[in-house]
Image: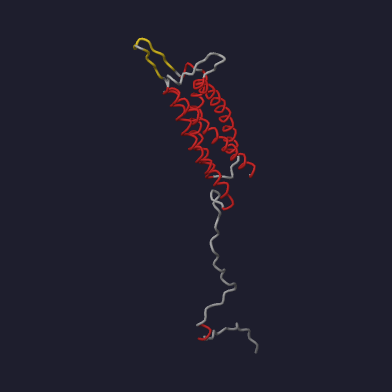
């Protein structure tokens, strides 16, 4: 007699196998160190450019002092000389000389430009890889060098004439009488030429930095 019966499976409990953890099909991935993303503002390759930009920032502060002092000293250089009585007076005023007026305005404009250029120079210190700001500062520096050199040269000619006069034109020197006027204008011219030298160095520094880029 043939009968079809379903086969029954009897599980066998094995304590040795039950104590073991089930094997995993793939090994756990190894822990990876977090990636370090370079900060664009502080790169080792930009150290030289950042030092040049920081020197540019300091030189602008250094040039601001002589230009501002020259403008103030020229604007306050008026002097009055009384002869015999107070009703007979001679005055030496800077605005009587167009060269001195141009000189004072040029120094004031240059001092204002140097103050306004400080934020741009600070931005170049933070991001030395930017070439557009460097080029803008270079062009403006060139303009200021030309204007300030012309003004300082014109004022230097008047100061020399005030000190020495001109025998051929029968112009007598006035510094024998107007000591304060000549002292202030002479100091202003010296300070302005110092600012011109600093600005020329700024132009060379900016051109070098752009060429390096």
Q: Is residue 70 above or below residue 42?
A: above
Q: Is residue 188 above or below residue 43?
A: above
Query: How far across and how far down the image is residue 197, in percent?
Result: 55, 35
Q: Residue at 54% across / 77% down in the picture?
A: 22
**Residue at the left extreme of this rendering:** 85
Query: How far across and how far down the image is residue 6, in percent?
Result: 60, 82
Which quadrant: the N terminus?
Answer: bottom right
- The color scheme shown is secondary structure
Compared across the picture, whether 33 is left or right of 181 comes to: right
Who is closer to the viewer here, 159 or 102?
159
Who is closer to the viewer here, 166 or 136?
166
Compared across the picture, whether 187 is left or right of 213 comes to: left
Which quadrant: the C terminus?
Answer: top right
Who is closer to the viewer here, 132 or 101?
101
**Residue at the front extreme of this rendering:** 167
Q: Quadrant of residue 69?
A: top left
Q: Quadrant of residue 157?
A: top right
Who is closer to the viewer here, 82 or 136?
82
**Residue at the top extreme of this rendering:** 87
Query: How far across and how far down the image is residue 68, in percent?
Result: 46, 30
Query: How far across and how far down the image is residue 119, in percent?
Result: 49, 38
- Total numbered badges shown on the rendered structure: 0
Compared across the picture, whether 2 is left or right of 64 comes to: right
């Amino acid at each position: 007699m043939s009968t079809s019966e379903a086969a029954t499976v009897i599980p066998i409990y094995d304590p040795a196998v039950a104590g073991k953890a089930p094997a995993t099909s793939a090994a756990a991935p190894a822990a990876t160190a977090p990636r370090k993303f370079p900060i664009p503002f502080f790169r080792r390759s930009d150290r030289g450019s950042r030092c040049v930009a920081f020197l540019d920032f300091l030189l602008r502060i250094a040039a601001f002092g002589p230009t501002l002092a020259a403008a103030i000293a020229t604007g306050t250089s008026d002097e009055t000389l009384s002869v015999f009585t107070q009703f007979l007076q001679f005055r030496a005023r800077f605005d009587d000389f167009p060269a001195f007026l141009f000189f004072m305005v040029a120094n004031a404009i240059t001092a204002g430009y140097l103050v306004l250029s400080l934020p741009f120079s600070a931005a170049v210190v933070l991001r030395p890889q930017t070439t557009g700001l460097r080029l803008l500062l270079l062009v403006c520096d060139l303009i200021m060098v030309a204007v300030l050199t012309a003004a300082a040269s014109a004022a230097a000619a008047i100061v020399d004439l005030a000190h020495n006069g001109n025998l051929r034109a029968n112009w007598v020197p006035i510094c024998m009488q107007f000591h304060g006027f000549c002292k202030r204008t002479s100091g202003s011219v010296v300070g302005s030429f110092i600012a011109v030298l600093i600005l020329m160095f700024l132009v060379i520094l900016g051109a070098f930095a752009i060429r390096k880029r």
